[in-house]
Image (tube, grey):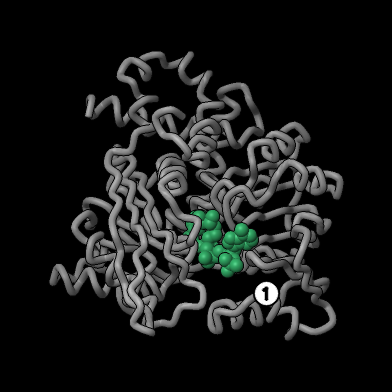
Amino acid sequence: TARNPGESEFHQAVDEVFESLGPVVARYPELLDSAIVERICEPERQIIFRVPWTDDQGTVHINRGFRVEFNSALGPYKGGLRFHPSVYLGIVKFLGFEQIFKNALTGMPIGGGKGGSDFDPSGRSDAEIMRFCQSFMTELYRHIGEYTDVPAGDIGVGGREIGYLFGQYKRITNRYESGVLTGKGLSWGGSLVRTEATGYGAVMFAEEMLKTKGLDFEGRDVVVSGSGNVAIYAIERAQSLGARALTASDSSGYVVDTEGIDLELLKQIKEVERGRMSDYAERRGASATYVSDGSVWDVPASVALPCATQNELNGRQAKTLLENGVVAVAEGANMPCTTDAVHMFQESDVLFAPGKAANAGGVATSALEMQQNASRDSWGFDYTQDRLQEIMRGIHESCAATADEFGMPGNYVAGANISGFIKVARAMVAQGII
Ligand code: NDP
């Protein structure tokens, strides 16, 4: 903490990984000899830059841009860009740190990085978003590339923003370098299933966990937070397995829909109109109720999928979920559960999947997009979805087997942290003190 003052989310993410590493260090003392633990916590490179842009009225705004290139032991830095007013170095570092282990778990050749800006896209016109993205890329372009660092989307950065960023990169470099960004449109280098991948992947991981207890999604009530990319496709997948997704939320409130979320309406409002959950409640009719205070975690269900943002599910809310009989929690978002909430789920024998395992389907499919770009190919939906499913099963298997091996059966947090750490640490040892 003295070395990285004020970066509370980064400290939380590091503590959570280190809590799991005692038995690893005891078994492989050689990993400590080359100061792996100290090196893995220090990003290889941190870039902070000014992003000036002009709004539609001609007023000049200055935002701050970030790219933290955390660890390249396994491949080029890979991780999303987040545009949200809460973004500061501590958030980017927590996300970048998590990304190292998540990417290792996918088994794909990608290192860890993350970036973004404290820019607030809400209420901005398309033209304003474009000018912001162009200004952001005018500095970022010199730091990224197919073999160096490959950004993607995250909160506030979807297909539209990736398009503007890619256009500006191409214009500055005069290179059609498809592999420089992922999450691209389907006609210009994007991959089928990338849009769905994080939400689908989180449900696939939850399915695997449920299977270990002879359970499945059929007929279950599921509570989901968020109404963005991850939440929408987690709901879609859960409903396709016969579950009823009761809720979706945004930062203003949440909707409970007793008939299950109407996906077509949700997609129309969020993906097309860029509207709010209150609009959904107004248009859905009698089955939907809009709640502007309280929390989505008050709604009884047996599976919880937090898919909005960090620290959105605390100990008190975990207690409510437990009292209401939750059996599985899978983090679609990054670090949505506070440390005490995670401990409560684990102590109560709830199946709990940490984000670095459960939401790795997004980055894994980004790596599949990179493969398609490198071979100038594009794969079909079913083939790509099967690859995603295979990867999510592999991650589940590796977390479960590692937890067993280290004497903590069923502890997916320890399994994910240890399995990801060992892979990265071994590569770092092999590559010398750099
Ligand atoms: P989006 O921007 O598409 O959606 C974010 C959603 O979360 C919005 O509905 C937003 O509401 C809501 N939200 C944000 N902050 C809060 C809050 N404090 N309380 C309630 N709701 C809130 O982002 P994504 O769906 O892409 O990302 C969601 C999470 O998943 C993030 O943690 C991200 O890091 C993680 N993730 C995303 C991946 C991806 O492929 N997209 C991959 C792996 C992880 P509002 O509109 O009001 O802000």
Pick the front one: 339 or 59: 59
Instruction: Examine the rendering and report whether any part of residue 15 can be seen.
Output: yes
- Residue lying at 55% horizontally and 40% vertically, measured from the top left: 397
- Of 270 and 46, the residue lying toward us: 46
Instruction: Determine the residue positioned at 50% across, 56% down.
Output: 86
Q: Is residue 233 visible?
A: no
**Element class at badge 1:** helix
Percent of width and height locating residue 74: 31, 40
Query: Which residue appears farthest toward the left when viewing the image?
Result: 174
Q: Is residue 354 left or right of residue 293?
A: left
Spot the residue most to the front. 59
Q: Is residue 76 left or right of residue 191?
A: left
Instruction: Report the amino acid beneath label 1.
Output: Met
Which residue bears the numbered disc 1?
277
Viewed as shown, does residue 29 lie left or right of 50?
A: right
Tell me where residue 271 appears, x and y as whole percent: 54, 78
Q: Residue at x 76, y 55 (%)?
A: 297
Q: Nearer the viewer, residue 136 or 171?
A: 136
Q: From what the image shows, is residue 360 above or below residue 230?
A: above
**Ligand 1 shown in quarter:** bottom right
Mark 1, ligand 1, within 8 Å: the answer is yes
